[in-house]
Image: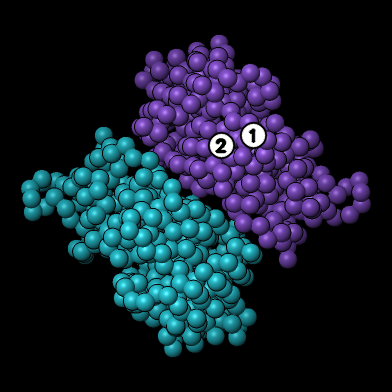
Chain colours: A purple, B cyan
Amino acid sequence: MTDEATAFVPGHVTGFFSAHPADEPVQAGSRGAGVTLADGVEVTIRRPETPTAATTQHVELDGETVEMPPVERVLDALGVDAWVSAETSLPLGAGFGVSGAMALGTALAANRVFECGRSENELTALAHIAEVQSGTGLGDVVAQARGGVPIRLDPGAPGYGRLDGVPERPTVEYVTFGELSTEDVLSGDTTQLSAAGEDALARLVREPTLTQLMYASRRFAREAGLLTDEVTEAIRAVSDAGGEASMAMLGRTVFALETGLSDAGYDAVSCRTHPAGATLR
Amino acid sequence: MTDEATAFVPGHVTGFFSAHPADEPVQAGSRGAGVTLADGVEVTIRRPETPTAATTQHVELDGETVEMPPVERVLDALGVDAWVSAETSLPLGAGFGVSGAMALGTALAANRVFECGRSENELTALAHIAEVQSGTGLGDVVAQARGGVPIRLDPGAPGYGRLDGVPERPTVEYVTFGELSTEDVLSGDTTQLSAAGEDALARLVREPTLTQLMYASRRFAREAGLLTDEVTEAIRAVSDAGGEASMAMLGRTVFALETGLSDAGYDAVSCRTHPAGATLR
Protein backbone atom coordinates (compact mmCIF):
# COMPACT_ATOMS: atom_id res chain seq x y z
CA MET A 1 0.00 0.00 0.00
CA THR A 2 1.15 3.48 -0.81
CA ASP A 3 -0.11 6.96 0.10
CA GLU A 4 1.09 8.70 -3.04
CA ALA A 5 1.75 7.93 -6.69
CA THR A 6 2.77 10.01 -9.72
CA ALA A 7 2.05 9.44 -13.39
CA PHE A 8 3.47 11.22 -16.42
CA VAL A 9 1.25 11.84 -19.44
CA PRO A 10 2.67 13.28 -22.66
CA GLY A 11 1.13 16.34 -24.25
CA HIS A 12 -0.76 15.72 -27.49
CA VAL A 13 -1.25 18.03 -30.46
CA THR A 14 -3.93 17.01 -32.95
CA GLY A 15 -3.28 17.99 -36.57
CA PHE A 16 -6.70 16.98 -37.92
CA PHE A 17 -9.79 15.13 -36.73
CA SER A 18 -13.38 14.20 -37.37
CA ALA A 19 -15.92 14.18 -34.52
CA HIS A 20 -17.96 11.03 -33.86
CA PRO A 21 -20.65 11.44 -31.22
CA ALA A 22 -22.30 8.29 -29.88
CA ASP A 23 -24.89 7.48 -27.23
CA GLU A 24 -22.30 5.55 -25.23
CA PRO A 25 -19.33 7.79 -24.32
CA VAL A 26 -17.01 4.75 -24.50
CA GLN A 27 -17.78 4.57 -28.23
CA ALA A 28 -17.79 8.32 -28.87
CA GLY A 29 -14.62 10.12 -29.86
CA SER A 30 -12.68 11.29 -32.85
CA ARG A 31 -10.62 9.93 -35.71
CA GLY A 32 -7.51 11.83 -36.64
CA ALA A 33 -3.78 12.15 -36.08
CA GLY A 34 -1.18 14.20 -34.28
CA VAL A 35 2.01 14.06 -32.26
CA THR A 36 2.59 13.30 -28.57
CA LEU A 37 5.13 15.49 -26.79
CA ALA A 38 7.85 14.84 -24.24
CA ASP A 39 6.49 18.02 -22.63
CA GLY A 40 3.56 16.71 -20.64
CA VAL A 41 1.76 16.65 -17.32
CA GLU A 42 2.94 15.09 -14.05
CA VAL A 43 -0.06 14.08 -11.96
CA THR A 44 0.36 13.16 -8.29
CA ILE A 45 -2.42 11.52 -6.30
CA ARG A 46 -2.48 11.54 -2.50
CA ARG A 47 -4.88 10.11 0.01
CA PRO A 48 -6.71 13.03 1.70
CA GLU A 49 -4.83 13.90 4.89
CA THR A 50 -7.95 14.93 6.77
CA PRO A 51 -10.88 12.89 5.60
CA THR A 52 -13.62 15.43 6.20
CA ALA A 53 -16.31 16.26 3.68
CA ALA A 54 -14.81 19.65 2.84
CA THR A 55 -11.36 18.38 1.91
CA THR A 56 -11.73 14.90 0.43
CA GLN A 57 -11.35 16.08 -3.16
CA HIS A 58 -8.97 18.79 -4.18
CA VAL A 59 -7.48 19.44 -7.63
CA GLU A 60 -4.46 21.68 -8.19
CA LEU A 61 -2.68 22.60 -11.41
CA ASP A 62 0.68 24.34 -11.13
CA GLY A 63 -0.13 25.26 -7.54
CA GLU A 64 -3.55 26.81 -8.27
CA THR A 65 -6.83 25.19 -7.24
CA VAL A 66 -8.79 24.40 -10.40
CA GLU A 67 -12.17 23.06 -11.48
CA MET A 68 -11.42 20.04 -13.65
CA PRO A 69 -14.56 18.01 -14.37
CA PRO A 70 -12.76 15.16 -16.23
CA VAL A 71 -10.55 14.55 -13.19
CA GLU A 72 -13.53 14.57 -10.82
CA ARG A 73 -15.36 12.13 -13.09
CA VAL A 74 -12.37 9.75 -13.08
CA LEU A 75 -12.21 9.77 -9.28
CA ASP A 76 -15.97 9.21 -9.09
CA ALA A 77 -15.75 6.29 -11.53
CA LEU A 78 -13.02 4.70 -9.40
CA GLY A 79 -15.06 5.44 -6.26
CA VAL A 80 -12.21 7.20 -4.45
CA ASP A 81 -11.56 10.57 -2.83
CA ALA A 82 -8.12 12.00 -3.51
CA TRP A 83 -5.96 15.08 -3.62
CA VAL A 84 -4.74 15.67 -7.14
CA SER A 85 -1.82 17.93 -7.90
CA ALA A 86 -0.57 18.37 -11.45
CA GLU A 87 2.36 20.23 -12.95
CA THR A 88 2.99 21.11 -16.55
CA SER A 89 5.00 23.46 -18.71
CA LEU A 90 2.36 23.21 -21.46
CA PRO A 91 0.07 26.16 -22.22
CA LEU A 92 -3.56 25.64 -21.10
CA GLY A 93 -6.56 25.68 -23.43
CA ALA A 94 -4.28 25.89 -26.43
CA GLY A 95 -4.55 22.41 -27.95
CA PHE A 96 -2.02 20.37 -25.94
CA GLY A 97 -4.42 17.93 -24.31
CA VAL A 98 -3.80 19.07 -20.74
CA SER A 99 -7.30 18.09 -19.56
CA GLY A 100 -6.96 14.64 -21.10
CA ALA A 101 -3.54 14.26 -19.53
CA MET A 102 -4.91 15.18 -16.11
CA ALA A 103 -7.75 12.67 -16.47
CA LEU A 104 -5.46 9.85 -17.61
CA GLY A 105 -2.73 10.62 -15.07
CA THR A 106 -5.35 10.68 -12.32
CA ALA A 107 -6.66 7.28 -13.43
CA LEU A 108 -3.20 5.67 -13.47
CA ALA A 109 -1.96 7.14 -10.19
CA ALA A 110 -5.23 6.67 -8.29
CA ASN A 111 -5.37 3.04 -9.43
CA ARG A 112 -2.04 2.49 -7.72
CA VAL A 113 -2.72 4.45 -4.53
CA PHE A 114 -6.14 2.95 -3.92
CA GLU A 115 -5.31 -0.50 -5.37
CA CYS A 116 -8.29 -0.43 -7.71
CA GLY A 117 -6.95 -3.36 -9.76
CA ARG A 118 -7.85 -1.95 -13.19
CA SER A 119 -5.91 -2.73 -16.37
CA GLU A 120 -4.30 -0.06 -18.58
CA ASN A 121 -7.14 -0.32 -21.12
CA GLU A 122 -9.71 0.04 -18.36
CA LEU A 123 -7.98 3.15 -16.98
CA THR A 124 -7.66 4.66 -20.45
CA ALA A 125 -11.37 4.00 -21.04
CA LEU A 126 -12.30 5.68 -17.75
CA ALA A 127 -10.32 8.78 -18.64
CA HIS A 128 -11.65 8.85 -22.22
CA ILE A 129 -15.25 8.60 -21.00
CA ALA A 130 -14.62 11.37 -18.45
CA GLU A 131 -13.26 13.69 -21.21
CA VAL A 132 -16.16 12.96 -23.56
CA GLN A 133 -18.75 13.49 -20.83
CA SER A 134 -17.08 16.76 -19.83
CA GLY A 135 -16.99 17.99 -23.43
CA THR A 136 -13.29 18.81 -23.07
CA GLY A 137 -11.89 16.45 -25.70
CA LEU A 138 -12.56 13.49 -27.98
CA GLY A 139 -9.26 11.89 -28.89
CA ASP A 140 -6.43 13.11 -26.69
CA VAL A 141 -6.68 10.40 -24.04
CA VAL A 142 -6.29 7.40 -26.35
CA ALA A 143 -3.42 9.13 -28.16
CA GLN A 144 -1.72 9.99 -24.86
CA ALA A 145 -2.05 6.39 -23.68
CA ARG A 146 -0.18 5.30 -26.81
CA GLY A 147 2.60 7.83 -27.37
CA GLY A 148 4.62 8.41 -30.55
CA VAL A 149 2.85 9.89 -33.58
CA PRO A 150 -0.62 8.37 -33.17
CA ILE A 151 -3.15 7.81 -35.92
CA ARG A 152 -6.65 7.32 -34.51
CA LEU A 153 -8.27 4.98 -37.02
CA ASP A 154 -11.57 4.69 -35.14
CA PRO A 155 -13.27 6.72 -32.43
CA GLY A 156 -13.63 5.43 -28.91
CA ALA A 157 -11.85 3.90 -25.96
CA PRO A 158 -9.70 0.73 -26.12
CA GLY A 159 -11.90 -2.14 -27.29
CA TYR A 160 -13.62 0.24 -29.77
CA GLY A 161 -11.00 2.53 -31.28
CA ARG A 162 -7.99 1.13 -33.11
CA LEU A 163 -4.74 3.09 -33.31
CA ASP A 164 -1.79 3.05 -35.66
CA GLY A 165 1.24 5.33 -35.84
CA VAL A 166 3.69 7.09 -38.12
CA PRO A 167 7.04 5.34 -37.48
CA GLU A 168 9.05 8.50 -36.84
CA ARG A 169 10.05 10.39 -33.68
CA PRO A 170 10.73 13.95 -34.83
CA THR A 171 11.59 16.95 -32.72
CA VAL A 172 8.81 19.53 -32.89
CA GLU A 173 8.50 23.21 -32.08
CA TYR A 174 5.40 25.07 -30.97
CA VAL A 175 4.22 28.61 -30.35
CA THR A 176 0.89 29.68 -28.84
CA PHE A 177 -1.07 32.86 -29.51
CA GLY A 178 -3.90 32.08 -27.12
CA GLU A 179 -6.82 29.87 -26.21
CA LEU A 180 -9.61 28.39 -28.29
CA SER A 181 -12.53 26.74 -26.56
CA THR A 182 -12.79 23.03 -27.37
CA GLU A 183 -16.31 23.03 -25.93
CA ASP A 184 -17.44 25.87 -28.23
CA VAL A 185 -16.12 24.21 -31.40
CA LEU A 186 -17.36 20.73 -30.55
CA SER A 187 -20.81 21.91 -29.50
CA GLY A 188 -21.31 23.71 -32.83
CA ASP A 189 -21.96 22.20 -36.27
CA THR A 190 -19.01 19.90 -37.01
CA THR A 191 -20.23 18.55 -40.37
CA GLN A 192 -17.77 20.44 -42.58
CA LEU A 193 -14.92 19.95 -40.14
CA SER A 194 -15.52 16.20 -39.93
CA ALA A 195 -15.70 15.79 -43.71
CA ALA A 196 -12.32 17.52 -43.99
CA GLY A 197 -10.97 15.31 -41.17
CA GLU A 198 -12.09 12.09 -42.87
CA ASP A 199 -10.40 13.20 -46.07
CA ALA A 200 -7.16 13.98 -44.21
CA LEU A 201 -7.20 10.59 -42.48
CA ALA A 202 -7.65 8.74 -45.75
CA ARG A 203 -4.60 10.57 -47.11
CA LEU A 204 -2.46 9.71 -44.09
CA VAL A 205 -3.52 6.06 -44.04
CA ARG A 206 -2.49 5.77 -47.71
CA GLU A 207 0.89 7.37 -46.93
CA PRO A 208 1.76 7.25 -43.20
CA THR A 209 4.68 9.69 -43.25
CA LEU A 210 5.45 12.95 -41.43
CA THR A 211 5.29 14.93 -44.66
CA GLN A 212 1.78 13.66 -45.33
CA LEU A 213 0.73 14.28 -41.70
CA MET A 214 1.73 17.94 -41.98
CA TYR A 215 0.24 18.39 -45.48
CA ALA A 216 -3.07 16.76 -44.49
CA SER A 217 -3.15 18.84 -41.29
CA ARG A 218 -2.65 22.16 -43.13
CA ARG A 219 -5.35 21.26 -45.64
CA PHE A 220 -7.69 20.32 -42.77
CA ALA A 221 -7.05 23.57 -40.91
CA ARG A 222 -8.01 25.56 -44.02
CA GLU A 223 -11.09 23.48 -44.88
CA ALA A 224 -12.39 23.34 -41.30
CA GLY A 225 -12.42 27.14 -41.12
CA LEU A 226 -10.59 27.32 -37.80
CA LEU A 227 -7.53 29.35 -38.85
CA THR A 228 -6.87 32.69 -37.20
CA ASP A 229 -4.73 35.41 -38.78
CA GLU A 230 -1.65 34.94 -36.61
CA VAL A 231 -1.80 31.15 -37.09
CA THR A 232 -2.08 31.50 -40.87
CA GLU A 233 0.85 33.91 -40.89
CA ALA A 234 3.09 31.62 -38.82
CA ILE A 235 2.32 28.54 -40.95
CA ARG A 236 3.12 30.54 -44.08
CA ALA A 237 6.35 31.90 -42.58
CA VAL A 238 7.54 28.37 -41.71
CA SER A 239 6.69 27.21 -45.21
CA ASP A 240 8.58 30.16 -46.75
CA ALA A 241 11.62 29.19 -44.63
CA GLY A 242 11.44 25.66 -46.06
CA GLY A 243 9.75 24.00 -43.08
CA GLU A 244 6.50 22.17 -42.27
CA ALA A 245 3.94 23.57 -39.82
CA SER A 246 0.25 23.39 -39.05
CA MET A 247 -2.32 24.39 -36.41
CA ALA A 248 -2.91 22.50 -33.17
CA MET A 249 -6.54 21.40 -32.83
CA LEU A 250 -8.00 23.06 -30.84
CA GLY A 251 -5.87 26.03 -29.92
CA ARG A 252 -4.43 29.21 -31.40
CA THR A 253 -1.19 27.25 -31.57
CA VAL A 254 1.20 26.43 -34.41
CA PHE A 255 3.43 23.35 -34.34
CA ALA A 256 6.28 22.62 -36.73
CA LEU A 257 8.67 19.78 -37.47
CA GLU A 258 12.27 20.14 -36.27
CA THR A 259 13.37 23.82 -36.19
CA GLY A 260 10.65 25.10 -38.53
CA LEU A 261 9.38 27.92 -36.31
CA SER A 262 12.72 29.20 -35.08
CA ASP A 263 14.02 29.11 -38.67
CA ALA A 264 11.11 31.42 -39.50
CA GLY A 265 12.08 33.81 -36.70
CA TYR A 266 9.55 32.74 -34.06
CA ASP A 267 10.42 32.35 -30.38
CA ALA A 268 9.22 28.74 -30.16
CA VAL A 269 9.46 25.93 -27.60
CA SER A 270 11.29 22.84 -28.87
CA CYS A 271 10.60 19.33 -27.62
CA ARG A 272 10.93 15.70 -28.65
CA THR A 273 8.08 13.49 -29.72
CA HIS A 274 7.40 11.21 -26.75
CA PRO A 275 8.12 7.56 -27.53
CA ALA A 276 5.91 6.13 -24.77
CA GLY A 277 2.34 6.43 -23.64
CA ALA A 278 1.25 7.63 -20.21
CA THR A 279 3.06 5.78 -17.46
CA LEU A 280 3.48 5.61 -13.71
CA ARG A 281 6.73 7.09 -12.46
CA MET B 1 16.94 10.25 -47.74
CA THR B 2 19.30 8.60 -45.31
CA ASP B 3 21.87 5.82 -45.61
CA GLU B 4 21.54 4.54 -42.07
CA ALA B 5 18.93 4.28 -39.31
CA THR B 6 18.84 2.69 -35.86
CA ALA B 7 15.90 1.34 -33.90
CA PHE B 8 15.73 0.22 -30.28
CA VAL B 9 13.52 -2.73 -29.34
CA PRO B 10 13.00 -3.68 -25.69
CA GLY B 11 13.63 -7.24 -24.54
CA HIS B 12 10.54 -9.24 -23.62
CA VAL B 13 10.13 -12.00 -21.07
CA THR B 14 6.95 -14.06 -21.32
CA GLY B 15 5.59 -15.42 -18.04
CA PHE B 16 2.86 -17.63 -19.56
CA PHE B 17 1.29 -18.24 -22.94
CA SER B 18 -0.99 -20.38 -25.04
CA ALA B 19 -0.09 -21.22 -28.66
CA HIS B 20 -2.57 -20.43 -31.43
CA PRO B 21 -1.54 -21.69 -34.85
CA ALA B 22 -3.47 -20.44 -37.88
CA ASP B 23 -3.27 -20.88 -41.63
CA GLU B 24 -2.49 -17.19 -42.05
CA PRO B 25 0.66 -16.21 -40.11
CA VAL B 26 -0.79 -12.73 -39.52
CA GLN B 27 -3.54 -14.39 -37.43
CA ALA B 28 -1.30 -16.96 -35.74
CA GLY B 29 0.42 -16.20 -32.47
CA SER B 30 0.03 -16.56 -28.76
CA ARG B 31 -2.02 -15.19 -25.91
CA GLY B 32 -0.21 -14.52 -22.65
CA ALA B 33 1.63 -11.92 -20.62
CA GLY B 34 5.08 -10.80 -19.57
CA VAL B 35 7.31 -7.80 -19.07
CA THR B 36 9.29 -5.70 -21.55
CA LEU B 37 12.80 -4.73 -20.50
CA ALA B 38 14.87 -1.55 -20.81
CA ASP B 39 17.65 -3.99 -21.77
CA GLY B 40 16.97 -4.58 -25.44
CA VAL B 41 18.40 -4.71 -28.93
CA GLU B 42 19.75 -1.83 -31.02
CA VAL B 43 19.34 -2.60 -34.71
CA THR B 44 21.13 -0.51 -37.33
CA ILE B 45 20.29 -0.78 -41.02
CA ARG B 46 22.65 0.43 -43.74
CA ARG B 47 22.43 0.47 -47.50
CA PRO B 48 24.91 -2.11 -48.88
CA GLU B 49 28.15 -0.26 -49.66
CA THR B 50 29.01 -2.46 -52.61
CA PRO B 51 25.85 -3.62 -54.30
CA THR B 52 27.10 -6.96 -55.61
CA ALA B 53 25.22 -10.22 -55.22
CA ALA B 54 27.59 -11.54 -52.55
CA THR B 55 27.26 -8.61 -50.18
CA THR B 56 23.75 -7.21 -50.52
CA GLN B 57 22.46 -8.88 -47.36
CA HIS B 58 24.53 -9.27 -44.24
CA VAL B 59 23.31 -9.78 -40.66
CA GLU B 60 25.54 -9.26 -37.62
CA LEU B 61 24.77 -9.66 -33.93
CA ASP B 62 27.30 -8.28 -31.45
CA GLY B 63 29.95 -8.25 -34.19
CA GLU B 64 29.42 -11.87 -35.30
CA THR B 65 27.81 -12.81 -38.62
CA VAL B 66 24.62 -14.73 -37.89
CA GLU B 67 21.86 -16.59 -39.70
CA MET B 68 18.63 -14.89 -38.67
CA PRO B 69 15.68 -16.06 -40.80
CA PRO B 70 13.13 -13.61 -39.29
CA VAL B 71 15.37 -10.67 -40.26
CA GLU B 72 15.84 -12.00 -43.78
CA ARG B 73 12.08 -12.49 -44.13
CA VAL B 74 11.44 -8.88 -43.05
CA LEU B 75 13.89 -7.52 -45.63
CA ASP B 76 12.34 -9.75 -48.31
CA ALA B 77 8.83 -8.56 -47.39
CA LEU B 78 9.98 -4.94 -47.73
CA GLY B 79 11.77 -5.81 -50.97
CA VAL B 80 15.11 -4.34 -49.89
CA ASP B 81 18.71 -5.46 -49.51
CA ALA B 82 20.46 -4.18 -46.41
CA TRP B 83 23.28 -4.63 -43.98
CA VAL B 84 21.90 -5.32 -40.53
CA SER B 85 23.99 -4.93 -37.41
CA ALA B 86 22.49 -5.51 -33.98
CA GLU B 87 23.85 -5.11 -30.47
CA THR B 88 22.44 -6.41 -27.24
CA SER B 89 23.41 -7.19 -23.67
CA LEU B 90 20.63 -9.79 -23.46
CA PRO B 91 21.44 -13.52 -23.40
CA LEU B 92 20.54 -15.36 -26.62
CA GLY B 93 18.10 -18.27 -26.85
CA ALA B 94 17.15 -17.77 -23.24
CA GLY B 95 13.67 -16.27 -23.48
CA PHE B 96 14.33 -12.55 -23.98
CA GLY B 97 12.83 -12.17 -27.45
CA VAL B 98 16.08 -11.27 -29.22
CA SER B 99 14.95 -12.72 -32.56
CA GLY B 100 11.66 -10.82 -32.38
CA ALA B 101 13.54 -7.65 -31.48
CA MET B 102 15.87 -8.06 -34.45
CA ALA B 103 12.92 -8.60 -36.80
CA LEU B 104 11.00 -5.59 -35.48
CA GLY B 105 14.06 -3.32 -35.31
CA THR B 106 14.93 -4.28 -38.88
CA ALA B 107 11.41 -3.43 -40.04
CA LEU B 108 11.42 0.01 -38.37
CA ALA B 109 14.93 1.02 -39.44
CA ALA B 110 14.68 -0.36 -42.99
CA ASN B 111 11.37 1.47 -43.46
CA ARG B 112 13.20 4.72 -42.74
CA VAL B 113 16.34 4.05 -44.79
CA PHE B 114 14.50 2.79 -47.87
CA GLU B 115 11.46 5.08 -47.44
CA CYS B 116 9.03 2.17 -47.64
CA GLY B 117 6.15 4.30 -46.33
CA ARG B 118 4.66 1.65 -43.99
CA SER B 119 2.80 2.45 -40.78
CA GLU B 120 3.83 1.17 -37.35
CA ASN B 121 1.09 -1.48 -37.40
CA GLU B 122 2.21 -2.64 -40.84
CA LEU B 123 5.84 -2.91 -39.72
CA THR B 124 4.84 -4.79 -36.57
CA ALA B 125 2.75 -7.17 -38.69
CA LEU B 126 5.68 -7.81 -41.05
CA ALA B 127 7.97 -8.66 -38.15
CA HIS B 128 5.33 -10.82 -36.44
CA ILE B 129 4.69 -12.80 -39.63
CA ALA B 130 8.45 -13.26 -40.13
CA GLU B 131 8.81 -14.67 -36.58
CA VAL B 132 5.84 -17.02 -36.95
CA GLN B 133 7.05 -18.29 -40.33
CA SER B 134 10.55 -18.83 -38.93
CA GLY B 135 9.19 -20.75 -35.91
CA THR B 136 11.23 -18.53 -33.59
CA GLY B 137 8.40 -16.91 -31.63
CA LEU B 138 4.66 -16.27 -31.40
CA GLY B 139 4.09 -13.24 -29.21
CA ASP B 140 7.28 -11.30 -28.60
CA VAL B 141 6.96 -8.90 -31.52
CA VAL B 142 3.53 -7.49 -30.63
CA ALA B 143 4.58 -7.16 -26.98
CA GLN B 144 7.83 -5.43 -27.98
CA ALA B 145 5.92 -3.00 -30.21
CA ARG B 146 3.82 -2.02 -27.16
CA GLY B 147 6.20 -1.87 -24.19
CA GLY B 148 5.31 -1.85 -20.49
CA VAL B 149 3.84 -5.01 -18.97
CA PRO B 150 1.86 -6.35 -21.94
CA ILE B 151 -1.12 -8.68 -21.76
CA ARG B 152 -1.75 -10.36 -25.12
CA LEU B 153 -5.52 -10.85 -25.13
CA ASP B 154 -5.67 -12.37 -28.62
CA PRO B 155 -3.12 -13.96 -30.93
CA GLY B 156 -1.94 -12.25 -34.08
CA ALA B 157 -0.56 -9.06 -35.56
CA PRO B 158 -2.17 -5.60 -35.14
CA GLY B 159 -5.65 -5.74 -36.64
CA TYR B 160 -6.13 -9.25 -35.18
CA GLY B 161 -4.56 -9.34 -31.71
CA ARG B 162 -5.69 -6.95 -28.98
CA LEU B 163 -3.35 -5.97 -26.17
CA ASP B 164 -3.84 -4.65 -22.67
CA GLY B 165 -1.32 -4.02 -19.89
CA VAL B 166 -0.69 -4.15 -16.16
CA PRO B 167 -0.38 -0.49 -15.10
CA GLU B 168 2.93 -0.85 -13.24
CA ARG B 169 6.57 -0.31 -14.23
CA PRO B 170 8.58 -2.45 -11.81
CA THR B 171 12.30 -3.05 -11.79
CA VAL B 172 13.06 -6.69 -12.56
CA GLU B 173 16.05 -8.97 -12.12
CA TYR B 174 17.00 -11.95 -14.23
CA VAL B 175 19.47 -14.82 -14.23
CA THR B 176 20.04 -17.33 -17.04
CA PHE B 177 21.18 -20.94 -16.74
CA GLY B 178 21.19 -21.67 -20.47
CA GLU B 179 19.22 -21.99 -23.66
CA LEU B 180 15.94 -23.70 -24.42
CA SER B 181 14.87 -24.14 -28.04
CA THR B 182 11.67 -22.25 -28.82
CA GLU B 183 11.39 -24.23 -32.06
CA ASP B 184 11.55 -27.59 -30.20
CA VAL B 185 8.85 -26.65 -27.70
CA LEU B 186 6.53 -25.01 -30.21
CA SER B 187 6.85 -27.85 -32.74
CA GLY B 188 5.84 -30.43 -30.10
CA ASP B 189 2.40 -31.07 -28.58
CA THR B 190 1.34 -27.80 -26.94
CA THR B 191 -2.13 -28.90 -25.78
CA GLN B 192 -1.37 -29.10 -22.05
CA LEU B 193 0.79 -25.99 -22.16
CA SER B 194 -1.92 -23.99 -23.91
CA ALA B 195 -4.63 -25.09 -21.49
CA ALA B 196 -2.44 -23.90 -18.61
CA GLY B 197 -1.77 -20.65 -20.48
CA GLU B 198 -5.47 -19.95 -21.04
CA ASP B 199 -6.13 -20.52 -17.37
CA ALA B 200 -3.34 -18.13 -16.38
CA LEU B 201 -4.64 -15.44 -18.76
CA ALA B 202 -8.15 -15.67 -17.33
CA ARG B 203 -6.68 -15.11 -13.85
CA LEU B 204 -4.66 -12.08 -14.94
CA VAL B 205 -7.57 -10.50 -16.84
CA ARG B 206 -9.71 -10.80 -13.69
CA GLU B 207 -6.97 -9.19 -11.60
CA PRO B 208 -4.41 -7.28 -13.72
CA THR B 209 -1.74 -6.78 -11.04
CA LEU B 210 1.94 -7.69 -10.79
CA THR B 211 1.25 -10.12 -7.95
CA GLN B 212 -1.24 -12.02 -10.11
CA LEU B 213 1.11 -11.95 -13.12
CA MET B 214 3.84 -13.64 -11.09
CA TYR B 215 1.47 -16.11 -9.42
CA ALA B 216 -0.16 -17.10 -12.71
CA SER B 217 3.27 -17.42 -14.34
CA ARG B 218 4.60 -19.77 -11.63
CA ARG B 219 1.49 -21.91 -11.84
CA PHE B 220 1.84 -22.03 -15.64
CA ALA B 221 5.51 -23.02 -15.48
CA ARG B 222 4.62 -25.97 -13.23
CA GLU B 223 1.59 -27.09 -15.24
CA ALA B 224 3.30 -26.74 -18.63
CA GLY B 225 6.07 -29.12 -17.51
CA LEU B 226 8.89 -26.86 -18.66
CA LEU B 227 10.70 -26.33 -15.33
CA THR B 228 14.30 -27.44 -14.98
CA ASP B 229 15.94 -28.15 -11.62
CA GLU B 230 18.01 -24.97 -11.39
CA VAL B 231 15.00 -22.86 -12.41
CA THR B 232 12.78 -24.52 -9.80
CA GLU B 233 15.44 -23.99 -7.15
CA ALA B 234 15.88 -20.30 -7.96
CA ILE B 235 12.14 -19.59 -7.96
CA ARG B 236 11.85 -21.31 -4.58
CA ALA B 237 14.83 -19.41 -3.18
CA VAL B 238 13.29 -16.08 -4.22
CA SER B 239 10.00 -17.08 -2.65
CA ASP B 240 11.76 -18.12 0.58
CA ALA B 241 13.42 -14.70 0.67
CA GLY B 242 9.98 -13.05 0.41
CA GLY B 243 10.11 -12.20 -3.30
CA GLU B 244 8.25 -13.05 -6.50
CA ALA B 245 9.90 -14.94 -9.38
CA SER B 246 9.01 -17.17 -12.30
CA MET B 247 10.49 -18.73 -15.44
CA ALA B 248 11.01 -16.89 -18.72
CA MET B 249 9.22 -18.64 -21.59
CA LEU B 250 11.12 -20.07 -23.37
CA GLY B 251 14.52 -20.15 -21.70
CA ARG B 252 16.30 -21.61 -18.71
CA THR B 253 15.91 -18.16 -17.20
CA VAL B 254 14.37 -16.89 -13.98
CA PHE B 255 12.99 -13.36 -13.65
CA ALA B 256 11.96 -11.69 -10.41
CA LEU B 257 10.31 -8.46 -9.33
CA GLU B 258 12.53 -5.75 -7.81
CA THR B 259 15.54 -7.28 -5.96
CA GLY B 260 14.06 -10.77 -5.59
CA LEU B 261 16.99 -12.72 -7.03
CA SER B 262 19.79 -10.78 -5.38
CA ASP B 263 17.93 -10.98 -2.06
CA ALA B 264 18.05 -14.77 -2.54
CA GLY B 265 21.80 -14.66 -3.12
CA TYR B 266 21.85 -14.89 -6.92
CA ASP B 267 24.17 -12.83 -9.10
CA ALA B 268 21.37 -11.32 -11.19
CA VAL B 269 21.08 -8.54 -13.78
CA SER B 270 18.75 -5.72 -12.76
CA CYS B 271 16.82 -3.58 -15.23
CA ARG B 272 13.75 -1.38 -15.49
CA THR B 273 10.56 -2.35 -17.23
CA HIS B 274 10.59 -0.42 -20.52
CA PRO B 275 7.79 2.16 -20.72
CA ALA B 276 7.76 2.39 -24.52
CA GLY B 277 7.47 0.07 -27.46
CA ALA B 278 10.08 -0.33 -30.18
CA THR B 279 11.11 3.02 -31.60
CA LEU B 280 13.47 4.65 -34.04
CA ARG B 281 16.41 6.42 -32.39
Give the residue drawn at x 39%, y 70%.
Answer: B95
Q: Position of residue A34 (x, y in %)?
A: 50, 33
Per the image, label 1 sits on a secondary structure element best described as loop
Label 2 vs label 1, nearer the camera: 1
Packing grade of label 1 (10 A; few <14, some 14-19, many >=20) is: few
Q: Quarter of the image holding residue A227?
A: top right
> Relative to B243, is A234 on the left or the right?
left
Per the image, label 2 sits on a secondary structure element best described as loop
Q: Look at label 2 and name its amino acid.
A: Pro
Give the residue drawn at x 42%, y 75%.
Answer: B191
Question: Looking at the image, can residue B33 be seen?
Answer: yes
The residue that label 1 is drawn on is: A22
A69 shown above or below A184: below
> Relative to B279, is B109 on the left or the right?
left
B153 shown above or below B267: above
Which label number is shown at residue A155?
2
Q: Where is residue A107 in the image (x, y as percent from the top left)?
A: 68, 49
**Whole-number angstrom distance, CA of label 2 to CA of label 1:** 10 Å
Which label number is shown at residue B65?
none
> Relative to A24, is A175 on the left or the right?
left
